[in-house]
Structure formats: C-alpha cells, structure tokens
Image: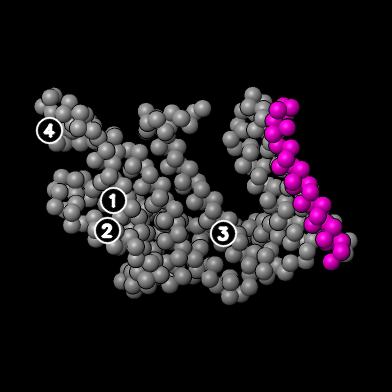
Amino acid sequence: MTARALVSRAPLVAFQIALGVALVAKGLVSSGVGTALVTLALFAVWIGGTLLNSWLAARPGVLRFKAFAIPLVFGLTLLAMWEIAVRGYGVSTVILPPPSAIAVRFSHSLPILWEDFVQTVIKGALSGFVIGCVAALVTAVVVDRFDFLRRGLLPVGNFVAALPIIGIAPILVMWFGFDWQSKAAVVVVMVFFPMLVNTVEGLHDTSAMQRDLMRTYAAGYWTTLFKLRLPAAMPFIFNGLKIASTLALIGAIVAEFFGSPVRGMGFRISTSVGLLALDLVWAEIVVAAIAGSAFYGAIALLEKAVTFWHPSQRGHGH
C-alpha cells in the first residue's frame, strides 16, 4: 500500500479500532471476558479484511483479477464474522445456523438441491423467462408498428406489472396445475411487461437525423428496424433482460409456495421452515443466490459483447 493510500484510509481504520475497543470494554463490563473476546475477534477480522481490500485497491498492477478478488475478500470476511458471532455468542441454530453447518448440509443434500434446482430454475424460471421475453420482443415490434396499440396496451401493461405476485400466483396455479407449467406462467406474467416497456422505449431512442438518413437511402420500415432501431435499442433490451432475470427466479420460487409437487426450491423452503431445518433453508438460499448471480452475469457478459459500441460499455474498461 502506498503512503498516500495509507494516509487516506487512516481515519477509517482508526474509527474501526476505536469502535472495537469501546465494544470490547462494554462486553467486559456487561457480559464478561468471553463476550469481549468474541467482539475483539469480530473486529480483528473486519479490520483485517478492510486492510487487505485497501491494499488490493491501491496496487492495480499487482493483481490482474482485482475486480473479482476484492468482492471475494469482502464476502469471506462477512462469512468469517458470521461464523464467529454465531458460535461465540451462542446463537441458536434454529434462529441462525453458522456457515459451516450450512456448508455441511449443502454437501450432504446435493441430490435434493439438484432436483429442486432443475424443477425451479430450469423448468419454471428459465422456460418462463424465454417465453415471456420473446413474446415481449415480438409484441414491442407490433406495438411500435401500430401506434394505437402503444396508447392502449402500455397503460394496461403498467397496471398488470403492478399486481402483487401473491395475488396472481394462486390463480395461475389453479389454471395450469401444480407442476412447473404454472410457475412458468407466473414468470411470464412477471417478465413480460418490464421487457415490453424497455423494448418499446429503446425502439424510440433513435434521433430524427438518423431516421432521416435511413430515408435518404430509401430504406423501408423493416430495413430501418433491423439496421438502425433494433441495434440502437439493445441497451434498453438488455436492461429489460437483466430486470427479468431477477424477477424470473423470484416468481418461480414464490409461486411454489401456493402449490407444487414434492420438489422445487419454494416447496423445500416452506416445508423445511415448518420442520425447523433452517440449515436446509439456507442451503436452498445459497443455490438460489448462485443461480441468480450466474444468470444475471451471463446476460451482462452477453450485453458487453453485443453493445461494445455503447459509451457505458466503453467506460467499463477503465
């Protein structure tokens, strides 16, 4: 770490140390030596993680994959503090299991977790995401072609998008059955209108000068659409895809609370809570977090490859 970086971060580190000392002293007075030592360990881990991330941030030439290392160090710091706090303060595993117990349950429940992942993410969320987004793209082109549809459909879309999922999920489960088809239907309803609104907005993002230029080349509607307007709308389309990727997983999981076969992440979470198997609940949450992050990250990587020309993507390279 350079001297300038050390000086700039000195007030933050000093504040953390002072706060840690105050809490340790409070623990000694109120709860004894054990609680004070646990508090001291927590602040030692936090300050160590802060200093390590400060060192990584101040040396751009040392670590090539710094963008991944800094969040990793931060996440490991939080996990270490979680483990120390739960075990040191004697928190009941029913209230909050430690990460080590969640990891053990995760490793012992891989067949169940995989079955739930396929049922919820692949069959329910992914199929609904694809159907909803493709339908929204096609509908956006039709709405763009006929202006009266835009004036009539988009207000209805905003109304439907505001409907709570806990209201529409039971209805769609009764319509489409208890298997993954009803969860896909919930996902379609959730992702369709955000994707539609973003795409329609993107199709109107071209300037009058650009459209006039296409007319000087005698380009018709479809040529202008595919050569100018759709490429210009790609940042909006990918914004809709990223929003839909998070909504899809949430919708599929929540819909399983209202009826599902004996598998699925939402089903497993609801039944495990009733059995007080909170370590399995947290294992399902870990799977959902990994799946959601990977899904979002894949769309972000595809966006970077497709919209490399956009100023926002060029700015990410610095």
Residue of label 3: 285
Query: Which SS type dominates the magenta stretch?
Result: helix
Residue 14 location, x and y as percent?
76, 43
* CA distance for labels 2 and 1: 8 Å
Q: Are marks 2 and 1 in contact (CB under 8 Å)?
A: yes
Q: Considering only vertical position in the picture, is 79 above or below 72?
A: below
Q: In the rendered structure, which disc, 4 or 1, sits on the residue that comes first in sequence?
A: 1
Residue of label 1: 196
- Crowdedness near tag 3: few (<14), some (14–19) or many (≥20) residues, C-alpha within 10 Å: some
Q: How is the image coloured?
A: one colour
Amino acid on which disc 3 is placed: Ile
Q: In the rendered structure, which disc, 4 or 3, sits on the residue that comes first in sequence?
A: 4
Quadrant for residue 9, please give it.
top right
* CA distance for labels 4 and 2: 29 Å
- Crowdedness near tag 4: few (<14), some (14–19) or many (≥20) residues, C-alpha within 10 Å: few
* CA distance for labels 3 and 1: 29 Å
Q: In the rendered structure, which disc, 3 or 1, sits on the residue that comes first in sequence?
A: 1
Which dot, 4 or 3, sits closer to the camera? Answer: 4
Highlighted range, magenta: 1-30
Mark 3: secondary structure: helix
Mark 2: secondary structure: helix
Q: In the rendered structure, which disc, 2 or 3, sits on the residue that comes first in sequence?
A: 2
- Crowdedness near tag 2: few (<14), some (14–19) or many (≥20) residues, C-alpha within 10 Å: some
The verdict on residue 39 being magenta is no
Q: Considering only vertical position in the picture, is 12 above or below 174?
A: above
313 sits to left or right of 13: left
Which dot, 4 or 2, sits closer to the camera? Answer: 2
